[in-house]
């Protein structure tokens, strides 16, 4: 069975692989147009400094001493070049050249802020032997008003950037192809059990269980593989689009209607697990598909592939450091091939637990009988929990807590938590009754905590925790007093008026890692004491509006969570960006570096 599936897939993929194999050598023998081989772009670092960055194609280089710069209505100072690579050139002798990328800083003297037209000239060659004449291009850059906020000068350079996403972008720039790809597979393994991936396990498990007790190990593994490939292809495609456009599509889909619709799919699936109905197509379509599926054992593969793709978009929109690093690399270099392959490898690493689920399903699941029905019902409850988890960010906290209480109490009743055991109860009956009692107690704790004013499902009784004398309740850790910023202009004004270090936090209601930072990091007493020395700003990008996108793009971020630090003069502190979740001890070290004297 398995061999026939792989044979069919191989026959479909083989023509594409042959075409790709023939195309690559042919493409390698053609020289690029100079406008493609050397791509310049310019951005303002502040009101008196512009950075001109050249992205250089693989196998090509630019001469350091051939650059020329001029500006209309402004005077260009002495350019600041980074160190290049020494090279013996047949045309110019011993020279200094740049491969892959070069960023040059230009001091500008101008009477006013606003748009400036730059004329940049560069000359380069290909390692294969052809040299190009000097290439002159016009660039436009807008100088900010004096004193406005900008990203750190080194923020786009992976080698100089101290934060993790910058180092990862540097890995892609400087490492070999296979080293970069294998490293991202390792990053995926590290991300495999994060809150962004873990919810996919019950989704896939529910799909496998829904196949019934006839599912074999090979079929369950193929279902898992189809799901993981759907997830991986989607991560790679959306990552490339995000890197080239600067917008994370999955963030745009995190709205109540989309989340509610996807949660509704899981509710429908869960009810079918409970036996309320059978999900099937009309008979005439079913017979046709059954006839086609007989040629390919495992006719549900395409549907499972699509579910994996949807899960990647809806369930896992978090921006962790490896993803941010890959998106940063793609955006800076335009190398969508390496960036996309790296993201594909990362998604495969994230899918390893899912493949293990598929491989072990045949061993772990009961073969037949009433146990199978019980397991299906258990996964129905898990799918309901997944649906609630999806919409939790857009629902009131009290409603979410009540939902978790119901998901614990109702199954506990069905597990006979309130019924006496029969006289000759088996060990399994006693075990399931014990599980039901635990679930019932947990659900009751949620109900009591909800009535007492608690809104944290993980700590429902915290509001009832009394003082040692039994007096008043202990107040929860106070929320961090962030001031919301609505636009880039609002941010500029507040940072310049602060007069002390500033922390800018990017947040969204749907961001799981943002919630983790609130619950486990910002609530820490030592962290809150250290934050007292900062002006605390927060950009809520839940709505993904034009202003939200502008704030993210200002700092080359693709989505939350992200934390930026500014010094007392309003300049970003290089190397201190926080992308993804950080625990309290690690974050304390970052705060100490951002403001050593506080």
Image (cartoon, helix red, strand yellow):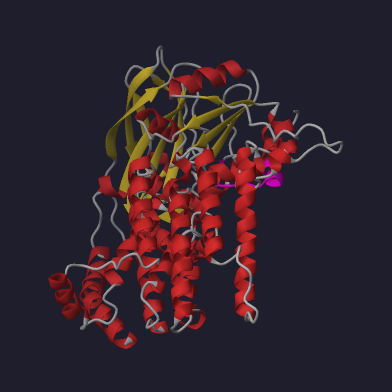
The quarter holding residue 113 reads top left
In magenta segment, residue 579 = yes
Q: Residue at x 40, y 22 (%)?
A: 143
Q: Residue at x 28, y 36 (%)?
A: 136
Q: Residue at x 61, y 62 (%)?
A: 418
Is the residue 513 above or below the residue 371 in the image? above
Judged left or right of residue 225, residue 187 is right
Q: Is residue 310 visible?
A: yes
The quarter holding residue 17 reads bottom left
In magenta segment, residue 189 = no
Q: Is residue 136 or residue 139 the one in the foreground? A: 139
Q: Is residue 148 or residue 65 the one in the foreground? A: 148
Extreme top residue here?
Answer: 111
Q: Quadrant of the N terminus?
A: bottom left
Residue 76: x and y in percent read 41, 23
Is the residue 505 above or below the residue 374 in the image? above
Q: Is residue 162 visible?
A: no
Magenta-drawn segment: 578-587
Q: Quadrant of the C terminus?
A: top right
Extreme right residue here?
Answer: 469
Judged left or right of residue 51, residue 428 is right
Is the residue 306 above or below the residue 296 in the image? above
Residue 140: x and y in percent read 31, 28
Residue 482: x and y in percent read 59, 27
Is the residue 558 above or below the residue 300 in the image? above
Judged left or right of residue 485, residue 248 is left
Query: Count of labels shown?
Result: 0
Residue 567: x and y in percent read 62, 27
């Amino acid at each position: 069975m398995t061999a026939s599936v792989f044979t069919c897939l191989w026959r479909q993929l083989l023509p594409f692989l042959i075409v790709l194999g023939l195309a690559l050598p042919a493409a390698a023998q053609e020289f690029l147009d100079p406008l493609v081989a050397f791509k310049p772009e310019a951005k303002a670092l502040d009101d008196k400094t512009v950075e001109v960055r050249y992205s250089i194609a693989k196998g090509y280089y630019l001469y350091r001493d051939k650059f020329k710069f001029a500006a209309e209505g402004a005077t260009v100072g002495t350019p600041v070049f980074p160190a290049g690579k020494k090279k013996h050139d047949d045309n110019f002798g011993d020279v200094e050249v740049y491969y892959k990328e070069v960023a040059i800083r230009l001091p500008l003297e101008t009477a006013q802020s606003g748009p400036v037209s730059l004329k940049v000239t560069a000359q380069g060659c290909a390692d294969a032997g052809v040299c190009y004449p000097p290439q002159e291009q016009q660039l436009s850059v807008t100088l900010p008003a004096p004193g406005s906020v900008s990203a750190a000068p080194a923020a786009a350079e992976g080698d100089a950037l101290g934060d993790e996403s910058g180092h990862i972008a540097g890995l892609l720039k400087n490492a070999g192809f296979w080293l970069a790809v294998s490293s991202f597979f390792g990053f995926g393994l590290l991300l495999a059990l994060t809150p962004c991936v873990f919810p996919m396990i019950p989704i896939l498990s529910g799909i496998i269980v829904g196949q019934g007790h006839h599912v074999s190990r090979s079929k369950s593994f193929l279902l898992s593989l189809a799901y993981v490939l759907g997830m991986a292809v989607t991560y790679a495609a959306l990552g490339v689009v995000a890197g080239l456009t600067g917008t994370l599509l999955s963030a745009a889909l995190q709205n109540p209607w989309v989340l509610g619709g996807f949660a509704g799919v899981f509710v429908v699936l869960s009810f079918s697990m409970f036996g309320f109905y059978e999900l099937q197509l009309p008979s005439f379509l079913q017979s046709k598909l059954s006839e086609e599926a007989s040629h390919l054992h495992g006719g549900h593969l395409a549907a499972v592939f699509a579910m994996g793709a949807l899960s990647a978009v809806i369930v896992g929109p978090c921006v962790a450091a490896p993803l941010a690093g890959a998106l940063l690399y793609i955006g800076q270099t335009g190398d969508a091939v390496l960036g996309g392959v790296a993201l594909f490898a990362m998604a495969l690493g994230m899918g390893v637990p899912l493949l293990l689920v598929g491989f072990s399903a045949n061993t772990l699941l009961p073969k037949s009988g009433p146990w199978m029905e019980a397991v299906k019902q258990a996964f129905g409850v898990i799918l309901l929990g997944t649906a609630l988890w999806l919409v939790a960010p857009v629902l009131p906290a009290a409603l979410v807590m009540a939902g978790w209480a119901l998901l614990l109490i109702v199954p506990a009743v069905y597990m006979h938590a309130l019924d006496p055991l029969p006289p000759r109860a088996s060990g399994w009956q006693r075990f399931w009754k014990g599980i039901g009692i635990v679930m019932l107690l947990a659900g009751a704790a949620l109900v009591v905590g909800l009535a007492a004013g608690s809104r944290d499902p993980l700590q429902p009784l915290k509001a009832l925790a009394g003082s040692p004398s039994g007096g008043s309740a202990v107040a929860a850790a106070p929320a961090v007093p962030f001031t919301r910023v609505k636009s880039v202009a609002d941010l500029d004004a507040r940072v310049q008026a602060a007069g002390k270090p500033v922390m800018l936090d990017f947040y969204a209601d749907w961001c799981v890692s943002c919630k983790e930072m609130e619950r486990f990091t910002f609530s820490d007493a030592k962290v809150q004491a250290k934050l007292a020395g900062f002006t605390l700003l927060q950009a809520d990008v839940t709505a993904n509006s034009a202003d939200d996108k502008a704030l993210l793009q200002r700092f080359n971020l693709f989505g939350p969570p992200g934390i930026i630090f500014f010094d007392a003069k309003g300049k970003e502190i290089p190397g201190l960006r926080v992308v993804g979740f950080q625990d309290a001890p690690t974050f304390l070290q970052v705060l100490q570096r951002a403001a050593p004297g506080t």
